[in-house]
Image (cartoon, rainbow, N blue to C red):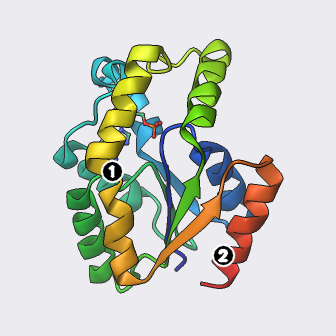
Amino acid sequence: MLNIALFGPPGAGKGTQAKKIVEKYNLAHLSTGDMIRKEIAEEIIARGELLSDEFVVRLIENSMAQHRGVNGFLFDGFPRTVAQAEILDRMLEKEGTPLKGLICIHVPFEELKRRMLERAKIEGRADDNEEAIAKRFREYNDKTVHVANHYKKKGVHIDVEGNCPVEEVFNAITKAIEEM
Ligand code: AMP
């Protein structure tokens, strides 16, 4: 099993890279953001706030159960808190298939903001406005950044430069995956 998580601030390109990774390695793409957008959580998303750990973990558990027999899982936008990371670790260890890597995509703040405002014009996501973007960065800095340290301690954390063309980022990611 190849279980990987894509990590990085909003706008780092996780969704774009996730689509390419799952295709190349035949993994199940588990994006909590996509799952939540299908649920009734639109109001919380629009404010840029994180949803409760319990709610998100339930979504992930259900989705993993629906994808039995795959080569592995690509977690996208999850775990976003240390509590979520600890729950995920327990779930995967129980199956004997721990997380092989947390791929951290790095992009400077100004570029992240530019990308999200650009995306707002194209996709019209409810949370791609100045106020929600600011809140999402605060949530990221308060709650999510610590997830990287959690996996650094476990020795499965990998840094990738994300401020370059999509294909270059993808090449760096595939190289990292093949060295795992
Ligand atoms: P994303 O598409 O990954 O940027 O997620 C969009 C929004 O969904 C976030 O701003 C949160 O409101 C919610 N969300 C996605 N994943 C999580 C998670 N793992 N924990 C809590 N909230 C989440």
Q: Secondary structure at mark 1?
A: helix
Of the pair 149 and 42, the residue shown nearer to us? 149
Q: Is residue 4 above or below residue 54?
A: below
122 left or right of 46 in image: right
Q: Which three-letter amino acid code belongs to the residue tagged 2?
A: Ala
Position of residue 64 in the picture relative to residue 74 (left or right) = left
- Residue 17: horizontal and vertical position, in percent? 67, 51
Q: Is residue 123 above or below residue 166?
A: above
Q: Horizontal and vertical percent for residue 94?
A: 27, 81
Q: State the residue in front, 81 or 58.
A: 81
Q: Is residue 84 left or right of residue 133?
A: left
Q: Nearer the viewer, residue 78 or 24?
A: 78
Crowd tier of the residue under label 1, counting other residues whose Cα lies within 10 Å: few below 14, some 14–19, many 20 or above: many
Tell me the quarter of the image containing the C terminus: bottom right
Label 1: which residue? 144
Q: Residues within 10 Å of mark 2 (few under 14, many from 20)?
A: some
Residue at the spot 56% in from the left edge and 28% down from the top edge: 113
- Give the numbered dot on residue 51: none
Q: Quadrant of residue 179?
A: bottom right
**Residue sitting at 23 percent across and 68 percent down?**
86
Q: Looking at the picture, how far across and down is residue 174, in whole percent?
A: 72, 70
Q: What residue type is disc 1 on?
A: Thr
Q: Helix or strand or loop: what does disc 2 sit on? A: helix
- Assess mark 1: CB under 8 A from ligand 1? no
Callout 1–callout 2 Cβ contact below 8 Å: no
Looking at the image, is 41 positioned above or below residue 60? above
Snapshot quadrant of residue 137: top left
Residue corresponding to mark 2:
176
Residue at (59, 20) in percent of width and height? 117
